[in-house]
Image: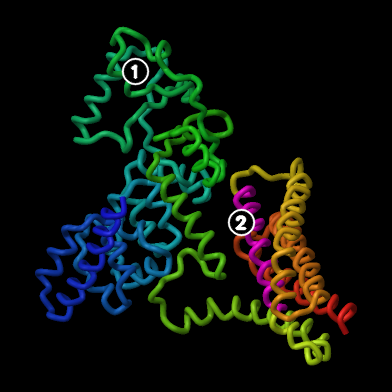
Amino acid sequence: MMPNQEMDTQSVEQRLLEFEQTVRIGDTGRIRDMVGGLHPSEIADLIEALPAELRAVVWDSTPADQRGEVLTETHDEVRDQLIAETTPEDLVAALEHLDMDELADLDEYVPTRVLDALVQAMDMQRRKRYQAVRNYADDTAGGLMDADAAAVRTDVTLDVVLRYVRALWKRDHNLPEHFDSMVVVDRSNRYQGMLRLGDLISRSPDLRVADVMDVDAAPFPADTPATKVARLFEDRDLISAAVVDSDGRLLGRITIDDVVDVIREEADHTLMSQAGLHEETDIFAPVMNSVRQRAVWLGVNLINAFLAAWVIGLFDQSIEKLVALAVLMPVVASMGGVAGNQTLILVIRGIALEQIGRANAWRLLINELGVGLANGLLWALVVATAAMLWFGSVQLGIVFAMALVINLINGAVAGTLVPLGLQRIGIDPALAGGVLLTAATDVVGFFSFLGLATLILI
C-alpha cells in the first residue's frame, strides 16, 4: 500500500513542478495539453495547489465541458475566485451540462443572471428536477440526491425492464451513475422497494418486478442529515439508495460518490476545527484574509493563556520559595490536557455517530471518571517517585502525585461534559471543545498543584 501512496505523491509533486516550469516558459499549447489530459477533480486539485496568480492559467486552459465539474470539486474561496474571473456567457456554457444536484450545490455561488439563464434554457423535465433538489438544504438527503432516478413499477415483467434499460442506453449511450439497482414505485410514484441489477439479469424475464424486488431496502426521507446518510451507507454497504418525501413518494436517488464527498468534508471539518479554521479555507488565500480568519482563534487562546498565567501569579511567592514548583507544574497541566483530549475525542466521535445521548451520558461520565482515577493513581506513583529522587523531598512527591490525580480526573470530567454541553447549546464540539478543555486542565492543574504545595510545603 505504501509504495502506491508514494508513487501518487510523487506524481502530484512532479505535475506541479512541470506545470510551473511550463508556465514560466509560456508554452500555452503544452499547458492546454497537460490540463486537457486530467480528470476534473485532478484539475481542481492542481488549481488549489497553485498560488492565486497561476490559477487563472489553469482555468483558462480547462476545456469548457469540464469547467462545471471542476467548480463542484473546488473549495468555496477558490470557487469564488474562478467564478469572478469567468464571463457570464462562459459560465453558462460551463454549467449547462451539470447534473441537477451538482448545479443546486453551486447556485448560491453563481450570479443570479447566470442562474436565470440556465433555468430558462432547461426543458420542463430538467427544470422540475432542479427545483426538487433546490427545495432541500445541501446537508440533507434531498440536497445530495440526483432527481433523475430510474424507476419501474411493480406490475411489469423483468423483460419489460430489460428493454427499458436498453432504451436508456440507446438514447443516452450511458446508464445512470452506479447503476446497481432501480427504484420500484407504484402508480402513484410511492416507493415500494429496490430491484437489484443482479436479480434483473439472472432471474426469469417472465417474472414480475414485485416477485423479485427487495422490500427491505429502506429509502431515506428527504430531510435526513447528510452525516446520517453517510453513516447508513457505511453500515449497510450501500452503493445507491432512494430518497422520498413525507408521503413516501420518490424524489430521487443518492449514490456512493455523493456520500464519499460527505465523509471527506466531515473529516476536513473535524481536522480544521481543531485549529479554528473552516474546511473550505484556501491554503493560498491572501495574507489579510488568513490573518482575519486566524486572529480570532489566537485571541481566544491568548485569553486562556492569560487565565492560566493569572492562576500562576496567585502563587508567585510560593514559586519563589520553592523553584521545583516551576519545574514540575507544566507536567501536571500537560498530563491533564492529554487525558482530557483522549476523552474529548472519544465523546465527539460518539456524538457524531449518535451513540451518546441523555440515556447514557451519565454512565459515560462515571466510566470516564473511573478511567481518570485509575490512570491518575498509576501515574501518580510514577511521578511521586521521580520527584522524590529528583528533588529529594517526599512531601513534594506526594503533592505532585495528588495534583496529578486531581487533574486527570478533571480532564475526564471536562472531556465528557464540555462537548455534551456545547452540543446542548448548539455549538459544534469539534470547533470549541479543545479550547475550553485546555483552559480547564491548565487552570485546575496549576491551581491544584500550586495550591496544595502552598498548604503543605510552605
Whether residues under marks 1 and 2 lie with C-beta atoms below 8 angstroms apart, the answer is no
Q: Give whichever of discs 1 and 2 has the lower sequence position.
A: 1
Query: Residue, x 60% and y 76% (percent of image)?
Result: 297
Q: Main secondary structure of the magenta part?
A: helix
Q: Provide the residue designation for mark 1.
A: 199
Q: Provide the residue designation for mark 2.
A: 345
- Badge 1 element: helix
The part of the chain drawn in magenta is 328-351
Three-letter amino acid code at the position of disc 1:
Asp
- Asked where in the image residue 396 lies, by quadrant, the reply is bottom right
Foreground disc of the pair 1, 2: 2
With 291 as the anchor, is 304 left or right in this view?
right
Circle 1 residues within 10 Å: few <14, some 14–19, many ≥20: some
Circle 2 residues within 10 Å: few <14, some 14–19, many ≥20: some
The answer for how far apart the CA atoms under marks 1 and 2 are is 43 Å
Q: Is residue 67 visible?
A: no
Q: Is residue 449 above or below residue 251?
A: below
Tell me residue 109's x, y (percent): 42, 63
- Asked where in the image residue 380 lies, by quadrant, the reply is bottom right
With 267 as the anchor, is 84 left or right in this view?
left
Query: Residue, x 43% and y 34% (percent of image)?
Result: 238
